[in-house]
Every structure is written in structure tokens, then in C-alpha cells.
Amino acid sequence: MRAQIQVLSTDEQTQIHERSLKLLENTGLRVLSEPGRKLLAKAGAEVNATTQMVRFPRALVEECIRLAPKKFKLGGRRPGWDLEMNIGECSLLADGGAVSVLDWETGEISPGTFDDWIKATHLIDALDEIGIYWNMVEGGFASESQSDFVSYWRNLFKNCSKHIQDSTDSAEKSRLLLEILQIVFGDKETIRQKHPFSHILCPMSPLTIDDTYTDAYLALTGWDIPVALMPMPLMGATGPASMISNVLLANCEALAVLCLVQAAEPGVPVIYAPFPQSIEPHTWRYTGGAVENSIFGAAMIEMGRHYGFPVEAGTGGTDQYYPGAQASYERAINWTLPTIAWPDILVGPGLLGGSTILCLEQMVMDVEIFRRCSRLYEGIPTDADRWLEGIIAQTGPGGNYLKQKSTLKAVREGRWYLSEMGFHDTYEKWKNAGMPDIIDGIQEITQNILKDYQPLALNAEADRELERLERHVRASEK
């Protein structure tokens, strides 16, 4: 039987839904996107053009929940790497947002470079537990121009073969992205079927849908691009100072964005991905390590399952700036509840210092934490061949189970989780080995992964086409 948790009772989930419907219908959200307001008005929302406030009737919200498909796949370049949503699997998503990189040897934190970006991208591509890529760190080159945008995506596809989740910040870049996707994956129908890219939409808490990223997303409609609905209220700052009210606010915002994307493209796939988080109440900074973030993550998974949606969950991170005891216990505790709640996608390996600092070794440690948490989720299997009452009777009092074939079979089938990280032998051997620390071993594992890793090569013709597109766009900017 699987390990199970319940943060929100069935009644509490229903209350969150009902209270969300009342807030959406009576208060609504401010929608800064003019095209977004027009689409919502056409779909049946009550729009005030002067105040930009939009109210969402109950019937509209419930129809949009019904319209969104509950099962679909996220594809990528790598053959056989499609991630099926809502079938009971969970994959990690490498978090976006780091602006700095930790040098393990010196302890120095510096702005990310292109080389840092390449290493992070290769590591993400190499670790099978990470199924989805979101830009881990600033790539060491400007990304404001459209030509740099094309260059970034060309480099990304040359170094990563998994599904990509990110966002664009202008309609022009969205149209360029569609060109890029066609060069790499084929025609429009292929992209609609394969879903190689999903777009993140983050409303601005509290109760505001922006225009920049919304209008950029709207330029992608018609291509069946999946959308991650990702409000991020911060308890006590951009969200009220109670946990249940932040869950309520995040749910309201997610449902509002759901209505917008379904109004724009009925039936487009969505991923329920609210990330309410706690802040440090003495300085009012977001630090990432609060234990409440673990509870938030599990609660939002339960709400996503309440609606039947695929779920993407965040768990917070760590306040610490360097791997060690604090970073390890904060991340391990913060990942446990969300993993046992078992989303389709779990966000966050590899970041320190409030998710602003990339550390490759931390990413490898976080994958190990995820493996262990996944083992917790597996619980205690109760298949018919696991009870072994006949073996108990046969072995009898004072017997030795080491001699039983069932024990050898269990070893061969991997019924124990055996970690390659850390030290798992006698004290004498540990002392004779120089009393190694787990962090030293993880550094060696990380370096070995990167040493000989070669990403799946991008099709040569596609690479040439992307290079031509980059030159063309760059020439048009002069």
C-alpha cells in the first residue's frame, strides 16, 4: 500500500473551491491585458474596462475546469522521453531563476557565466530523475534582443533533449519561438501532438493578471501549448498572513488564469501549479527554507487532484548559501510531504539561498533526496508474493532468513533502497578511509557525471536552420 498523507480534508478542499468561486464572482481579478479582457468578456466574464477588473461567474469557472484535458503528454527531442501527465508518475523539474553560481572549491558566489549554464544544462540532461528543463541560471549572455533569444534556444536544443518549460515576454519572441519549434520538431500538427514546450503563466499576487507575459502567451494560442498556472503568493506580503488564506488566494488566481487560457484556446492543456510560499517575518524576505512551504506544496497537490488536473508542485528551498547540514535538513523536510502527496512534476533541485544560487552538487544531492522520498511514497507493497507466511512457518522459531531463496530474490529485485551517496560501511573502514564527508563524495559524483557526458546531437539541418534564423534576426536589428 502506498504511503498517504492528507493535509486538507475532503470538506476543506470543497470549501476552498466554493470560497474561490465566491471571490472570483464577487471580487474578481484585475486583468492588465486588454486582449485578455476581451477574450474573457466574450467567454461570459463581467469586465469593467475602466478599472480593468474582471469578475468570473461560477458557470464560466466550472465550464473551464471541464474543458481542460486531464491527461496529455509533455514531449521532447529524446526518443521515448514523453512524460505522461496524470498516470501516477512524478518527474523533477529543474527550477528557473538562479542569478548566481556557487564555486564549490572556493565557496565564492559569482554571477553565472555561459560555461556555468552549459554545465547545469548537461547535468540536468544527464540525470534521469529530472524530466523537465527550466532555465537554471543566467546564461552569461544578454537575452534582451530577439537575436540573442534565438541564440539561447539554439544552444538549449543543442545541449538538452528533454521537455522545456519556460515563458516568453513578448508576442514577437513567442512568434520566433514557434519558428524555432517548427525547425526542431516539424510542422504545427506535430508540435500540437508532441507538446515539446509548456508555457508558465504567473499572475501577480494578489489578484492581478499581468499584460507582458499574458500577451506573450496569447501569441502562442492555436498551437495547443500546455500552460502551467503558477500564482506565487507570499504569506504576509503578497498574500494574507494565514496558511489557509494563501491556499485560497493561490487557488483563486490559478482558476482565473485557467479561465483566460480556456477562453483563448478551449481545450488547451493546463498544469495546476500554484506555489504559495512563506517569508521570513523578521526581515520580510523570501528565503525558501520555511517548513510551511512543505505543507503548502502538499496542500496544492491535493487541490489539483480535487479538480483532476495534472499537478506541478513547489516545495521551497533553503535559507543557506552553501551545502551542509542546514541546507540538507531544510530541503529534505520540505520535499517529503509534497513527494508523498505525489505530483506529476516536482520543482526545485539544485538551488540555494532562496532559490537564487545554483549549486551543481546540491542538484545531485536533491536528486538523492527525491529518490528517498519516492521510496517513502512507495510505502509497503502488499502483493501476494510479499506476505511470505509460508516462509515464516518453514523457518520457524530461531531460524535464519539469510538462507532463504526469497531473501536472495528480494535482493535481486531491489527491495532495499541502496544509495551510492555517503558512507555505508563500518566505523573502522570509515576512519581508515580518512573519515570522508558525504559532500566530498557528491562532488566526485557530480564531476564524473559531467566528465564524459555528451548530449543528444541536434539534427544538423535543424542546427543550420536555427543558425540562419539567428543571422537573419540579427541583421534585421542593425
Image (cartoon, rainbow, N blue to C red):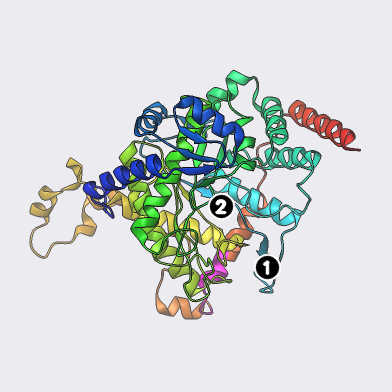
Q: Residue at x 37, y 28 (%)?
A: 63
Q: How far apart, in angstroms, are the residues tagged by discs 1 and 2?
A: 19 Å
Residue 197 in picture, x, y percent from top left: 58, 34
Please, what secondary structure does the residue beneath circle 2 have?
A: loop
Name the residue type under label 1.
Asp
Which quarter of the rendering shows the C terminus? top right
Callout 1 touching callout 2 (CB < 8 Å)? no
First in sequence, mark 1 or 2: give its number. Answer: 2
Compared with 131, 297 (above or below) is below
Front-most of 28 and 80?
A: 28
Q: Which of the pair 428/333 is nearer the observer?
A: 333
The residue that disc 2 covers is 95
Report which residue position mark 1 lands on. Answer: 103
> Residue drawn 50% across and 25% down?
42
Is-magenta flag for residue 437? yes
Q: Give the magenta range.
A: 434-442
Q: Which mark is residue 215?
A: none
